[in-house]
Amino acid sequence: MSEETRAREDICRIARSMFDRGLTCGASGNISVRLSDGTLLVTPTGSSMGFLDPARISLLSADMHHLSGDAPTKEMPLHSAFYETRSETGAVVHLHSTHAVALSMLPDTDPDNVLPALTPYALMRLGKVQLLPFFLPGDSAMGAAVRGLAGRRSAVLLANHGPVVAGKDLWAAAFAMEELEETAKLALLMRGMNPRLLSDEQIRDVVRAFDVDW
């Protein structure tokens, strides 16, 4: 099986799993994967992540020109910004997952680090997650906002919209995205309960032990 064929199938399998578990719904969410030759596979615009066809996934050149398949997601400015600013990025996942979106709308959410230090796993897989302002879907300004971070963040949360996560490969990006959503859910469940957060020393230990970009 070729690299491209496997990537197409993995995109559909992961997207369907996320859809079936309610992490995305309707025609929301998108995924891209960078192949070893620099080309990109991207889920098509207006498609449901629960019903993707591997043969219809968009193929883009390294400089983002559409080569084949259906037209790519209109959120390409988000994807391209991560590939441009984080050379280690092999895949990008964007969802409209419920708990992360809810967290983005709360006035006391820390814009520099939206996830409280509840578990080591969110730190390990995500580092700090930046809250970005609201943009119209597909607005190229979203990409400019990600570029403005100069590659310092592997994940962002778009206000009133949803999270975007970059990873070294598709599985890493998907696992990190799920960790973000679960941590957002946990944060909402614990609101008003004064939970015991990881201490500064514990955070430093995790960052050092797992080489987290903090």
Image: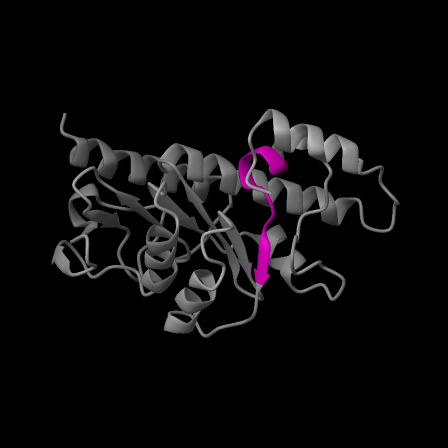
- Left or right: 161, with 35 as reference point: right
Q: Quadrant of residue 77?
A: bottom left
Tally of numbered discs: 0
Magenta segment: 122-131
Q: Tell me if I can see residue 198 in this picture.
A: no
Q: In this view, does 118 lie above or below 58?
A: above
- In front of the other: 17 or 134: 134
| Residue depicted at 31% across the width and 56% down the height | 47
- Image coords of residue 85 (percent x, y): 38, 54
| Residue depicted at 51% across the width and 38% down the height | 176
Residue at the left extreme of this rendering: 67
- Left or right: 33, with 181 as reference point: left
- Image coords of residue 86 (percent x, y): 39, 48
Q: In which quarter of the image is residue 212?
A: top right
Q: Tell me if I can see residue 164 in this picture.
A: yes
In reply to whether residue 89 is colored magenta, the answer given is no
| Residue depicted at 21% across the width and 31% down the height | 6
Report the quarter where the N terminus lies. Answer: top left
- In front of the other: 81 or 134: 81
- In front of the other: 37 or 98: 37
In reply to whether residue 127 is colored magenta, the answer given is yes
- Image coords of residue 165 (percent x, y): 46, 48
Report the quarter where the C terminus lies. Answer: top right
- Image coords of residue 60 (percent x, y): 18, 54
- Coloured how? one colour
| Residue depicted at 57% across the width and 27% down the height | 210
- In front of the other: 62 or 175: 62
